[in-house]
Amino acid sequence: MITYDALAVHPPTFLCFTGLYPEEFMALLLDFDLAWHTYELDQLIASCPRSRRPGGGRKPKLVTSEAKLLFILLYIKLYPLQAVLGFLFGLSQPQANDWIHTLTPILRDALNRGRLLPERDGSRLAAVLAATEEVLALLDGVERPKQRPTDPEQQRADYSGKKKGHRRKNILVTTYHQRRVNYLSDTMEGRRHDKPIADQSALTFPEDMTLAQDTGLQGYCPSNVRICQPKKKPRGQKLSSEDKARNTLIARLRIRVEHVIAGVKRSRIVKDLFRNTKAGYDDLVMEVACGLHNFRAECRHWGSL
C-alpha cells in the first residue's frame, strides 16, 4: 500500500506521483485538512439522528489527511484506472470511486481557501487582471479528448471536426509574467469554436490592456483592449516579410499561454482520454487542474522569471 511516509523520502518519485514536492504537499495539506473537517461537520449536521456515536463500523483505509490528499493527487496526476488506484491504496474499485467523488470537491475547496482557483465569471475578470498590474493578457482555447458518448445527439455535440474526435473545450486567460490561470470558462462541447465560447463568456478587461490571441479567435475584439493577433496568409498569396516578422514576434509572446496550458495538463486527467461519466465532473477536474497549476506557480515563483 502506498503511503505518504514511504514516498516523502524520495522527493523526485513523490513529484512523479503527485506533481508536487513534499514541502509543497504539506503546504497544501493545511487547507485540505480544514476543508475535510468542514465537510465532516456539514455531513454531521445534514445527517439523520444517529442511533450510535460517530465513528462506529469498519474503519476506512484512508484514515489520515495525508493519505486522503495523496490519494486524490495521485489520481489527478496519473489518472489510473479506478481498479488500479484501489489496489495501490488497499481499496476495492467501488470504494475508490466513492473516495474520488468525495475528495475531488474537497480538494477544490482547499485550493479555493488559498485563492488559487481561476475566476469563472467573465464580468469579474477585469478586476482580477487589474490586480496583477500587468499590461499583456493571453487568451487561448483548451481541448481535451473524451470517450465517444452513447447518445447520438451528444456524439454530434462533442465531435470536433478539427481534431477528428470527441472533445470537451474551455478557454482560459493568463498574463505574461505571472503565468497563472486567471480565468477559466465553462466546459463546452467539442464542436463549439473558441470565438463563440469567448463571446458567451462576456469577458471584461481593464482599460488599455493588450490581448494576445490566435487566429482561432478571428473577429473577437472586446472593448477597451488592443488586439495582438497573427495575420493569416491570404488565399493564393504570400505574407510579406514584415508580416512574417510580426507573426514571429507575436508567437514569442503567445508561447507563454502554451506553457500555462502545458502546466495545467501535467494533471493527466485533463490530458488523457477522459473516462468519467458523472455529470459535471469534467468541469470540476479542469478547475482543480488549473488550481494546482496556480499553486505550483505560486510555490515556485515562476512569475518572477
Image: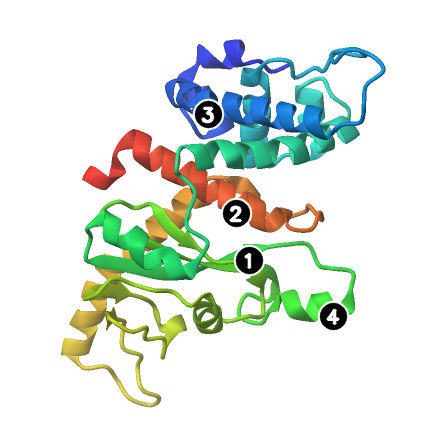
Tell me if mark 1 has few (under 14), some (14-19) or many (20+) residues whose alpha carbon lies within 10 angstroms of its own: some
The percent coordinates of residue 185 (x first, y second) are 47, 58
> Which residue is under mark 3?
31
Label 4 or label 1, whichever lies nearer to me, is 1
Are discs 2 and 3 less than 8 Å apart at CB? Answer: no
Residue for point 29% across, 63% down: 205
Which label number is shown at residue 187? 1
What residue sits right under mark 2 in the picture?
A: 286
Of callouts 4 and 3, which one flags the residue occurring earlier in the amino acid sequence?
3
Camera-side residue of 109 and 298: 109
Secondary element type, mark 3:
helix
Regarding residue 19, the answer to whether it shows in the image is yes
Front position in the image: 183 or 264: 183
Q: Secondary structure at mark 4?
A: helix
Up-down relation of residue 179 to residue 192 (above or below):
above
Indicate which disc, 4 or 1, sits on the residue closer to the N terminus. Answer: 4
Q: Which residue is mark 4?
A: 153
**Image coordinates for residue 266, horizontal then vertical, percent:** 45, 40
Indicate the position of residue 296 as horizontal and vertical percent values. 36, 34
The residue lying furthest to the left in this view is 242
